[in-house]
Image (tube, rainbow, N blue to C red):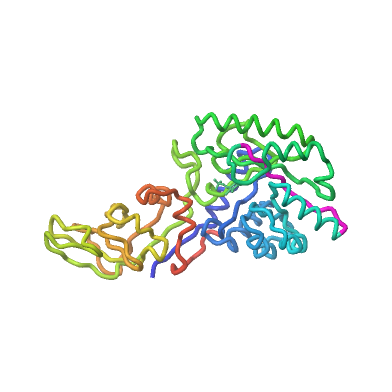
Amino acid sequence: MALLEIDLGAVVWNWRKLAAMHGGATAGVIKADAYGLGAAQVGPALLAAGCRHFFLAHLAEAVALAPRLPGAMLAALNGLRPEETGECRARGIVPVLGSLHELGWWRAEAAAGGEELPVILQVDTGMARLGLAARELAALREDRTLLQGLRVEYVLTHLTSADAPPAPVNQRQARDFAEVMRQFPGAKTSFANSSGMFLGADFASDLARPGAGLYGLNPTPAAANPMRPVVRLNAPILQIHEVETGASVGYGGSWVARRPSRIATVGVGYADGYMRALSNAGSARFDDTPVPLVGRVSMDLTTFDVTGLPASPGDMLCLLGPAHGPDELAREAGTIGYEILTSLGRRYRRRYIGA
Ligand SMILES: *Cc1c(COP(=O)(O)O)cnc(C)c1O
């Protein structure tokens, strides 16, 4: 069975490195089960390292993690629906709200409970996804009661193109965010994601929100990766097939041997998040030698060309590791490292090291 090794020591090292770069506080974004790596393990490791703010996407994710993260702020980025306000208050989760509808529901909860409730306000400066738009910000300016009973912990916005630093939209969002903050004098800000933390002083805030960088993805795609690798995925070779010139491999015969070849089969496939788009495009490593993925990725099996290498059944192929990580595999699959990590399968044996 394939073994997925997750280095919590590297996650903590990455968080400390980002936190040391940043003037304000640094949160940990652990949504989507800590990008597929295990929020129940990553969260407490970050808490032990001094992280006191965590972002999840859904309220249910925050509720599930809360008992493991005592004393920390847990915030739900996707906000609230009306039937969720009671649970959100009872569990002490801070909702990130970005519409007057949501503010109304949360205000009603505050009034019903007779206590002030915390909120993080999201403003839209370019994503057009979540967050208060200009018209709603104007409404908040004109009618202070729209925030009655609510305590604004942070005002948050999200960059669209932080991984492409020359993009003028970054500076434009920084200017617009600064302008919005004139409306909330004294309120704390939350701005940069991982890549945004590398954009300089205009992108500093009271609370940075890195996710990707914690998990070893490169927040500066145009330069060498400053983060430590976190994941290693090794799969044992199940069988080796010696095939003749002209023989095809796998479904549809999409790869045909041009020479006598040795084909190694591993028990990992698209059902494990090892994407079918890697068919005839991906690669693995045998020791340090790249071996091309040949034929189609099938549900539970994938084949590699190990011709000329001393590979035998039981030997390991490294599908993800320091030399060929999620960003590199993503390039071969035509996607991004985020999707590789969040797709990592449930059938791998998982081992947490370094904590
Ligand atoms: C996911 C997310 C982040 C983290 O982004 P990374 O690129 O993974 O560092 C920060 N802020 C918001 C609003 C997000 O949705």
Residue 117 drawn in magenta: yes
Q: Is residue 4 left or right of residue 144?
A: left
Residue 299 drawn in magenta: no
Q: Closer to the camera, 128 or 36?
A: 128
Picture coordinates of residue 235, whole percent (x, y): 36, 65
Q: Is residue 263 visible?
A: no
Q: Is residue 218 left or right of residue 17?
A: left
Q: How many marks?
A: 0
Q: Residue furthest right?
A: 114
Picture coordinates of residue 345, whole percent (x, y): 45, 64
Quadrant containing the N terminus is: bottom left
Q: Is residue 161 left or right of residue 121?
A: left
Q: Residue at x 80, y 48 (%)?
A: 151
Picture coordinates of residue 306, whole percent (x, y): 23, 59
Quadrant containing the C terminus is: bottom right
Which portion, as a residue range, is magenta? 114-125
Q: Is residue 327 left or right of residue 240?
A: right
Q: Closer to the camera, 171 or 180?
A: 180
- Judge whether 76 appears above or below 239 on screen: above
Q: Residue at x 35, y 59 (%)?
A: 276
- Judge whether 332 appears above or below 271 on screen: above
In the picture, residue 315 is in which quadrant? bottom left
Q: Is residue 151 visible?
A: yes
Picture coordinates of residue 120, whole percent (x, y): 72, 47
